[in-house]
Each structure stands twice: as structure tokens, then as C-alpha cells.
Image: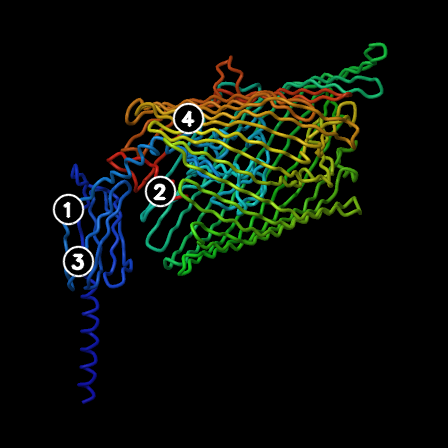
């Protein structure tokens, strides 16, 4: 009896297992084709749902022949949705799948979305830029000249943005702005972090010139948000870029030959509830260079002149890796975790010959002359780590609660070796070293709910950043041993804490869009210096109001206006009072009591969309309290003391315009320009020196592309920045023209790009910048000459699931990202 029971149980188990396996062997297959030309629609997205509760059961992607198969399905009632960019969605219902059935749907015809194409007629010709209520959005792909470079090479083409010869980035003439990467703020300075991000990984750039209250109020120039490439739909994306530099055309007599090579790889995968993206890069980008200078100082009626010239070159490289994982367990919850780790290295060599002459101004007699050689090697390097976690929950009433936290670490360190040599004698040998690690933490909680015709958003944020700097200055004695000089050495510890809350309401009524909000902030800055027993504490309570409107007029015209209050916070470089001998001529230091800048911004303008492109113009005004300036004074006969200080008040009134045009199918054109008047008035050096300077400044960014054939294109690019006033002088104009030619293979998956960077040809005077400052007892002017006529070759391969035989506009990224 027991044996019979065991046999029945075993038989029942085998039948159950067989039935279960049998039920899982059903499948559905088919071929997706274009309804008009019957060509396969490769990489179309197929999703299967249960009829009972409309739950997404599974999904797949059609292959290059348009074929797909959904396997391991249970018997039941289903419906299928077929989707692809630019096509109308196709719904196949009433699919009654029997056990072990292999259902073949045959050809599934999908039609082009005429409404989508009509809309693209207005927007698609100008997909390279989109104007929104509080920002302008630009696609990075239009700037081929940036390929193989960094994010700096991309953003310098924006109409509001300029980059000078020192690599300093300005937005509407302001060097202070907030950087976001995929919406996440970074606390390391903009130039450093953007030079870590490969241009090939940049999807698009947002310029938020009148930020609303939900954003941090940091940055008088507004916000630049960089979004990086990732998968758009279910499937796999894989891309590889390699680049190398051709031999230098000009060497400027530099000791070493420049090396230029690098590469990056990007991988993304999205399937059902999961999304993964990862990338890695390496870039070596040395630059040859030269400098010419002329300086004089006056002390006790003795004038010392020391003109100079010599090498100024850079060896630099960086590498890093990133990944992001997203998980959406259901339609109400979303998790995301991201990580970045990288390293950056830079050596700047300045080998300069000086001709020093002393003259008694009372009688014009030369009382001394000396010729000497200065070798100055400055090193900067750092490890960078960023990590973030995000969670969002959507409630049944469509309100949303989101939480995010961000950690950032930058292990910044470096040194400056400075030797003055006369003949065979080293008469001065100094060494500056520093370690200045940064730890930053940020967490925020936001809640958004629909009220009336708009959305109310509120939130709280806490920010903390710490730097623990150790700065050592030493001089070699007669024995060649380095001895620490206490007066120029010490520790500087800085802690910044910020608590902020905000609330804003955004809505739309007819043709009017609006956003209005208020942010409150409590900020505490605590700076301690080992050589100073007095604490340097600064506490602020501030309100940051903001308001924006966008009104639709007739015939594609829109009117916009915005106001906001901003703050430009001080960094530790500006605060550090310990002098650093950056090179032979200068001793640099900050001010521990430096005040942040407070800025009121206002802007108004128009945008226009038309069949062949788009146009915008914006008039803006900035009122700047406590403008931070870098000024010089005489420290010794051949040394200027360069310090940071507040200098009264400054105002900037400007106009920026931009356009994207596509006059023909084979020619596209982009132009952006910014013109402003800058006025600064105040006093420096404890009110002993009056500052009054005013000038008009403009910048022009041009980009044009010619499609010579379906696989061959030629692009020209130009960035121009005019003379700019400073508190004590002027920075000269800066010009950088570039040309690129691109050839694609394998239906666009493989491309070769030849770049001619910083074109000069011996007569354009590109990639040069002269910086001049002066006072009652000094004058200094230095012409920095950077390498021109650089040739680079880039190879790119993209296994991109969105590559199509039918040419479709790429404008829908605006729908995905914004």
C-alpha cells in the first residue's frame, strides 16, 4: 500500500513538473516592417502584456531583419505593443495562446507617425537646441570639433560661454557658475571636473541662466548641467572611440615632444526593470607653448625692469571610470546608484630667461644689471571619487517623494619647484608642496504634488564640505638641503555647512508658463589657520527669490522673462592666506576674511521657431555686490604679491543671441554671440587704492557643417573672445578656429574624423592671450602663446541599436531627457 502511495505521489510530481514545463514552452514570433516600403524595422521594441491586469510580462527587441521572438510563455490571453521612434505604436490584441503553441504573427506593419514628422518640421530642423522657460538645451553631437576632447571643448561653443587661454570658463562673462552632471552638483571647481569628462560621453548641455528656487543658488553665471549618454530603450549600446595626435607642426623650442592619444568606451544595457551604463576613458593631451613678458616695479625711486621669454608647456593626462545602475521594481518606485573614480595629472614647465635692470629714477643712471635663468615646474594632481544614491516614490495621487545623497572626495596635491640660476650658480632654490583633500556630502529630500493647473515642489537640503590643507614652503641652504620657512608654511582647515529649504509653484495657463519660488539658506563658513589664533567664521541667513515666465505669441514667437538672486561662494584657494611662490615673479595668497559675492539677475527675451531652424535673443542684467578680484601689489623688486580681495560693486548689462539654421539638407549653421558692458567701482588694499574700470566685451561662437555626401561631412568651428577689463588692467582677445572632416562606414557605425585644431597658418594669431595689469608702482604684461595647428585623428565605433536604414530626426531626446 505504501509503495502504491509513493508511486502515485511520484507520478503526480512528474505530471505536475511536466505540465509546468509544458506550459512554459509557448512562444510568439513575427517580423516588424514599414507599412509603406515593406522594409524591416530593425530594433523595434516589442512588449507583451496580460489582458487580465495589463501587467508588462516581457519584452524584446527586433533584430536587423525586423524579426523577434517571445519565448517561455504560459498559456493565456495577451496583447502586444510594437513601438519605434518616429512610428505609430501598433497594438495587437486578443492573442489567446494555448499551451505549447508557437504563434507566428507574420508581418506586422507599422506606419510613420505623420504628426511626429510634422512637429519635427518645426523642431527637427533645430533639434540642436531647445529653448525652455528657464534654460537653453543644446545637443553635443553638433560640435564635431570637440570629439576626442573633454566636456570643456563642448560647452565652450554655447552662446553664453567662453573659455580663455588659461582654460578659465565664463558664463555671460562670469567665471562663477554651478556645474551639474546628470543633475548632480559637484563641489570641485568647474574646470577640473569638466576636464575629466570625455566629450564623447556628453549627450547634451543645459544652460540654466535664471535658475528657479529648487536649484542651489550657487554661481553668478547660473548653472551648466551636463547629461551623459546612456541607453534610450530596451537593449544594448556599445561605443568605442580612439584618438591620436599627428606630429607637432610647431615645437616652440620645447625640451620634450608632445604626446596626444587616448580613448574611451561606453556600454549601456536596459531591460525591463533594470538599466546599467558604464564607461571608462584615458586621455593624454600635452601642449607646447611659449611666453613673453615685460615687468617693472618701483621701490624707493628705484625702477627694476625684468623682461623675460621662454618655454611654457604642459604635460597632462587623466583617466577614469563611471557606472550607473537603475532599478524600477514597479511604476511607483525607482532606485539609482552611480559611481565615478578618476585621476588627473598636470605638469606645467616654465623655463624662462630674465634680463634684470635697475635704474635710479632721480638721475636715470643704471645701477645694476643681471641676467639669469628661472626653471619653474608646477605639478597638480588628484584622485577623484563621486558616488550618489537616488530614490523616488510616486503615490496614488501622482505626487512624488524623492530622496538623493551625494558624496564627493578629491585628493588634491601638488608642488612647485622654483630655481633661479645665474651662470653656473643656483642663487635661489625653493620648493612649495601642498596637500588639500576635499570631502563633500550632500543630501536632499523633495516632494512634488499637482495642485490646480500646476505643480507645487518643496524640499530640504543639507550640504557639508571640508578641506584640510597642509602647505609647506622650503628653501635650499648652502648645503643643498631644503629647510622649511615657517612664515610661508602652515595648515588651513575649512568647513562649510549649508541648510536650505525651498518651495516653488510652476504651472501653465493657456499660452503662459510660469515658475515662482523662494529659497531660504543658513550658511556657516569656518576657517582655521595654524599660524593665526583668531578664528575666521562667517555666518549668513539669506533669502533667494526667483520667478520665470514664458508666453507663447503668434507665428512661433515666445516671450520669456526671469529674475533670481544668486551667491558666488568663496573657495579655499581664494581664502588661503599662506603665500605660495607660484613662479619667479609672483607670490600668491588669499584672504581668510574674503566675502562671497551676492548677485541679482534679471533677463528678458524672445525665441522663434520656424521651418528652417530657430532663433533666440536675451537681454540680461547682473548687479554684483562684493565682486572678488585678483589684484597685484609690489612685494619685492622682482616679485609681485598677487592676492584675492573684494572690490566694491560691479554691474553687467548684456545681450546674447543665438540661432540654429538648416538652409538646405546638406548645410547647417549655428551661431551664438554675447555682448555686455562690465563696470566695476570700489577700493582695494584697505581703501588705499581706487578701482574704476569699464569696457564692452563680446564673444562669438560659430559652427557650420556641410554634408558633402551621405557619408562625408566637413565642419568649421570658431570661438572668439574680445578684450576684457579687470580691476587693474585688461586681458586680451582670444581666438580659436578649428576644422574637421568626417567619414562614416558600415552604415554609420564606424567613423573616422580628422581635426585641425587652433588653426593659425602663421598669420591668424590664434591661441594667444596677453594679460596686463598695472598700478602706481608696477606694470606687468605677459603674452601666453599656446600651440597651434594641431592635427588629431579620431576613430569611433558604435554598436547602436537605434541605427536605422530609414533616416529619422533625432529630436526625441528632448522628450526623453527633459
Q: Nearer the viewer, mark 4 or mark 2?
A: 4
Displayed quadrant of residue 103: bottom left
Secondary structure of the residue carrying numbered label 2: strand
Are dots 2 and 1 in contact, CB under 8 Å?
Answer: no
Secondary structure of the residue carrying numbered label 4: strand
Q: Nearer the viewer, mark 3 or mark 1?
A: 3
Q: Earlier in the sequence, mark 4 or mark 2?
A: 2
Question: Colour mode?
Answer: rainbow
Tell me the residue that label 1 is attached to: 107
Residue 92 in view of the camera: yes
Tell me the residue that label 4 is attached to: 670
In percent of the image, x 69 and y 28: which residue is there?
583
Secondary structure of the residue carrying numbered label 3: strand
Q: Position of residue 514 (x, y in %)?
A: 47, 43
Residue 318 in view of the camera: no
Q: Earlier in the sequence, mark 2 or mark 1?
A: 1
Q: Position of residue 808 (x, y in %)?
A: 28, 35
Amino acid at each position: 500500500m505504501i509503495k502504491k502511495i509513493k508511486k502515485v505521489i511520484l507520478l503526480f510530481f512528474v505530471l505536475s513538473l511536466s505540465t509546468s514545463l509544458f506550459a512554459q514552452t509557448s512562444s510568439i514570433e513575427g517580423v516588424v516592417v514599414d507599412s509603406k516600403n515593406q522594409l524591416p524595422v530593425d530594433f523595434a521594441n516589442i512588449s507583451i502584456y496580460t489582458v487580465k491586469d495589463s501587467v508588462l510580462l516581457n519584452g524584446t527587441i527586433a533584430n536587423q531583419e525586423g524579426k523577434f521572438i517571445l519565448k517561455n510563455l504560459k498559456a493565456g490571453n495577451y496583447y502586444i505593443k510594437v513601438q519605434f521612434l518616429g512610428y505609430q505604436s501598433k497594438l495587437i490584441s486578443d492573442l489567446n495562446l494555448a499551451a505549447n503553441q508557437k504563434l507566428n504573427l507574420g508581418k506586422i506593419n507599422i506606419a510613420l507617425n505623420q504628426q511626429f514628422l510634422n512637429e519635427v518640421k518645426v523642431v527637427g530642423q533645430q533639434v540642436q537646441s531647445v529653448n525652455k522657460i528657464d534654460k537653453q538645451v543644446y545637443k553635443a553631437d553638433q560640435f564635431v570639433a570637440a570629439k576626442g576632447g573633454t566636456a570643456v571643448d563642448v560647452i565652450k561653443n554655447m552662446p553664453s560661454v567662453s573659455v580663455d587661454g588659461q582654460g578659465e570658463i565664463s558664463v555671460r562673462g562670469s567665471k562663477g557658475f554651478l556645474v551639474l552632471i546628470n543633475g548632480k552638483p559637484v563641489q570641485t571647481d568647474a574646470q577640473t571636473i569638466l576636464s575629466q569628462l570625455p566629450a564623447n560621453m556628453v549627450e547634451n548641455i543645459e544652460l540654466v541662466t535664471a535658475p528657479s528656487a529648487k536649484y542651489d543658488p550657487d554661481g553668478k553665471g547660473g548653472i551648466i548641467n551636463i547629461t551623459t549618454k546612456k541607453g534610450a530603450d530596451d537593449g544594448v549600446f556599445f561605443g568605442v572611440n580612439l584618438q591620436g595626435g599627428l606630429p607637432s607642426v610647431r615645437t616652440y623650442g620645447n625640451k620634450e615632444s608632445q604626446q596626444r592619444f587616448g580613448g574611451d568606451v561606453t556600454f549601456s544595457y536596459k531591460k525591463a526593470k533594470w538599466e546599467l551604463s558604464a564607461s571608462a576613458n584615458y586621455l593624454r593631451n600635452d601642449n607646447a607653448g611659449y611666453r613673453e613678458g615685460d615687468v617693472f616695479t618701483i621701490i624707493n625711486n628705484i625702477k627694476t625692469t625684468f623682461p623675460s621669454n621662454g618655454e611654457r608647456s604642459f604635460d597632462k593626462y587623466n583617466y577614469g571610470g563611471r557606472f550607473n545602475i537603475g532599478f524600477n521594481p514597479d511604476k511607483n518606485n525607482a532606485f539609482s546608484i552611480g559611481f565615478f573614480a578618476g585621476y588627473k595629472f598636470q605638469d606645467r614647465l616654465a623655463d624662462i630667461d630674465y634680463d634684470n635692470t635697475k635704474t635710479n629714477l632721480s638721475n636715470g643712471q643704471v645701477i645694476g644689471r643681471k641676467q639669469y635663468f628661472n626653471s619653474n615646474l608646477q605639478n597638480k594632481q588628484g584622485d577623484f571619487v563621486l558616488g550618489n544614491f537616488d530614490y523616488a516614490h510616486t503615490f496614488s495621487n501622482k505626487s512624488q517623494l524623492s530622496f538623493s545623497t551625494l558624496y564627493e572626495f578629491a585628493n588634491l596635491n601638488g608642488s612647485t619647484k622654483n630655481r633661479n640660476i645665474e651662470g653656473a650658480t643656483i642663487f635661489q632654490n625653493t620648493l612649495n608642496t601642498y596637500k588639500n583633500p576635499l570631502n563633500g556630502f550632500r543630501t536632499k529630500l523633495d516632494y512634488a504634488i499637482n495642485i490646480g493647473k500646476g505643480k507645487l515642489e518643496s524640499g530640504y537640503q543639507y550640504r557639508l564640505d571640508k578641506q584640510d590643507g597642509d602647505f609647506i614652503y622650503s628653501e635650499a641652504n648652502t648645503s643643498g638641503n631644503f629647510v622649511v620657512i615657517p612664515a610661508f608654511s602652515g595648515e588651513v582647515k575649512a568647513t562649510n555647512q549649508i541648510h536650505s529649504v525651498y518651495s516653488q509653484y510652476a504651472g501653465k495657463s493657456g499660452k503662459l508658463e510660469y515658475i515662482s519660488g523662494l529659497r531660504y539658506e543658513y550658511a556657516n563658513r569656518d576657517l582655521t589657520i595654524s599660524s593665526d589664533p583668531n578664528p575666521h567664521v562667517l555666518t549668513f541667513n539669506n533669502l533667494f527669490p526667483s520667478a520665470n515666465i514664458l508666453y507663447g505669441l503668434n507665428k512661433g514667437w515666445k516671450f520669456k522673462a526671469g529674475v533670481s538672486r544668486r551667491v558666488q561662494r568663496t573657495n579655499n584657494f581664494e581664502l588661503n592666506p599662506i603665500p605660495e611662490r607660484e613662479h619667479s615673479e609672483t607670490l600668491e595668497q588669499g584672504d581668510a576674511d574674503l566675502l562671497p559675492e551676492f548677485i541679482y539677475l534679471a533677463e528678458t527675451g524672445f525665441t522663434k521657431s520656424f521651418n528652417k531652424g530657430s532663433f533666440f535673443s536675451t537681454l540680461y542684467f547682473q548687479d554684483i555686490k562684493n565682486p572678488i578680484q585678483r589684484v597685484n601689489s609690489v612685494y619685492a623688486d622682482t616679485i609681485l604679491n598677487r592676492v584675492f580681495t573684494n572690490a566694491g560693486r560691479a554691474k553687467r548689462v548684456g545681450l546674447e543671441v543665438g540661432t540654429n539654421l538648416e538652409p538646405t539638407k546638406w548645410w547647417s549653421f549655428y551661431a551664438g554671440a554675447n555682448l555686455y558692458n562690465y563696470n566695476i567701482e570700489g577700493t582695494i588694499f584697505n581703501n588705499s587704492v581706487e578701482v574704476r574700470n569699464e569696457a564692452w566685451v563680446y564673444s562669438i561662437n560659430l559652427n557650420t557643417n556641410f554634408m558633402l555626401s551621405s557619408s562625408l561631412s566637413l565642419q568649421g568651428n570658431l570661438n572668439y573672445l574680445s578684450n576684457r577689463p579687470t580691476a587693474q588692467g585688461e586681458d586680451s582677445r582670444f581666438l580659436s578656429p578649428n576644422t574637421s572632416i568626417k567619414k562614416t562606414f558600415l552604415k554609420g557605425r564606424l567613423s573616422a574624423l580628422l581635426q585641425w585644431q587652433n588653426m593659425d597658418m602663421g598669420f591668424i594669431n590664434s591661441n594667444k592671450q596677453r594679460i596686463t595689469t598695472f598700478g602706481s608702482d608696477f606694470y606687468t604684461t605677459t603674452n601666453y602663446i599656446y600651440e597651434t595647428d594641431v592635427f588629431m585623428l579620431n576613430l569611433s565605433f558604435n554598436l547602436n541599436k537605434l541605427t536605422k536604414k530609414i533616416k529619422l530626426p533625432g529630436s526625441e531626446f528632448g522628450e526623453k531627457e527633459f
